[in-house]
Amino acid sequence: MTPRQRFLAACRCRPVDRPPVWLLRQAGRYMAEYRAVRARHSLLDICRTPALAAEVTITAAERLGVDAAIIFADLLLPAAPLGLELEFAAGEGPRLSPPLRTAEQIARLPEQWGGALDCVSEAIARVRAHFGPGGLPVIGFAGAPFTLASYLIEGGGSRNFIETKRLLHAQPAAWDELMRKLTAGLAGFLEQQAAAGADALHLFDSWAGALSPDDYRRAVLPHTRRLVELAGAAGIPVIYFSTGAAGFLEAVAETGAAVLGLDWRISLSAAWERLSRYVQPPPALQGNLDPALLLAGPEAACAAARAMLAQARGRSGYIFNLGHGILPETPVETVQALIRCVRGD
Ligand code: CP3
């Protein structure tokens, strides 16, 4: 099977010769080639220059020998069409200003983002042309409405999501309007990525686990399900990734995504068991090795990977991945050893 056939078959729960593998944050600071590009360009310059974004995407995927390439971009790029200023201060994480806190600000947000993020689809077209039809599939991505909203409202990363939850609970109509507008904008952005040649679309709901099951179901799920439906209309698989959400895995499955990306807080076997009881056929699963295992050396990482593959043995619909992004401290040799081990080389 070509990597594209293998990856798409796994997304659709069809038989594969072996599970496909790729890694969250496979292009990042742990890799010398990435650091060399970053020494000359800011993160946002790389994201906004299709030739650089394509180079970084391709180099990481080829260096590792994975079965898919996720386009190099950032979840926060939509800040620009939404009228917020975005900066990454060294060592401090992202800052967005002014933070979105009032119904008046939400009423002024645009629903369509126009050509503001054309750089991402142009980068996808370049990566697609590089790999060609027999090569690696390209994964387009965006933040899911809740996780994107949390950055816009908090003005950056957050531990307790105080302002996000304040808006959600105290101003439900403004919250719904925000989620509806973000869903519309994200749908257009994802459609552009599909039209440029993305083979699959990945939604990051990295902080969904901050919510209670009831709040997720009521205030987030309807919008997320709508976005999955709109994104899936292009006919390519949608992967929905969340962390800390195993407590409401069944609600997560109701997004309708073809593939659910899981973190390590639930075992693959437990997830399959619960999902199979809830929906037939269950969605494909992606994940979910704790990225910290890669800090324990190649033997420990490979042993954990083999245990994970054993849980998936005999099932179609499995994509090997980490449960969250590769940590910057990770030795690249350990990552390469892990990939060889999963590929069975
Ligand atoms: O290879 C890939 O995974 C593709 C590239 C990618 C980046 N960001 C580049 C990046 C992807 C998929 C993202 C998604 C993203 N961005 C998420 C969701 C994924 C997740 O981890 O849950 C989030 C929450 C963001 C927002 C973001 N971008 C934060 C909070 C930070 C700061 C983190 C830090 O450690 O400083 C970023 C910066 C960022 N985006 C880096 C990379 C490779 C860090 C490296 C750098 O500064 O060059």
Image (spheres, rainbow, N blue to C red):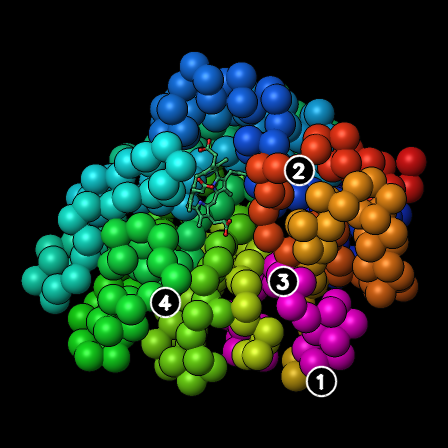
Q: Which residue is mark 2?
A: 330
Where's residue 251, x and y in %? 53, 78
Q: Distance between the Cα atoms at labels 1 and 4?
A: 33 Å
**SS at mark 4 in the image:** loop
* Foreground residue among 76 and 230: 76
Q: Which badge, 3 or 4, comes first in the chain's sequence?
A: 4
- The answer to whether residue 308 is above or below residue 225 is above
**SS at mark 1 in the image:** helix
* Residue type for callout 2: Thr
* Residue type for callout 4: Asn
Q: Distance between the Cα atoms at labels 2 and 1?
A: 37 Å
Q: Is residue 107 visible?
A: no
Q: Which badge, 3 or 1, comes first in the chain's sequence?
A: 3
Q: Residues within 10 Å of mark 2 (few under 14, many from 20)?
A: some
**Is residue 269 in the magenta section?**
yes
Q: Which residue is mark 1?
A: 277
- Residue range highlighted in magenta: 250-276
Q: Which residue is mark 3?
A: 262
Q: Is residue 120 left or right of residue 303?
A: left
* Residue type for callout 3: Leu
Where's residue 173, x and y in %? 19, 76
Q: Which mark is residue 205?
A: none
Which image quadrant for residue 252?
Answer: bottom right
**SS at mark 2 in the image:** loop
Q: Which residue is mark 4?
A: 160
- The answer to whether mark 1 is within 8 Å of ligand 1 is no
- The answer to whether residue 193 is above or below residue 45 is below
**Is residue 310 in the magenta section?**
no
Q: Is residue 202 left or right of residue 150?
A: right
Q: Which badge, 1 or 4, comes first in the chain's sequence?
A: 4
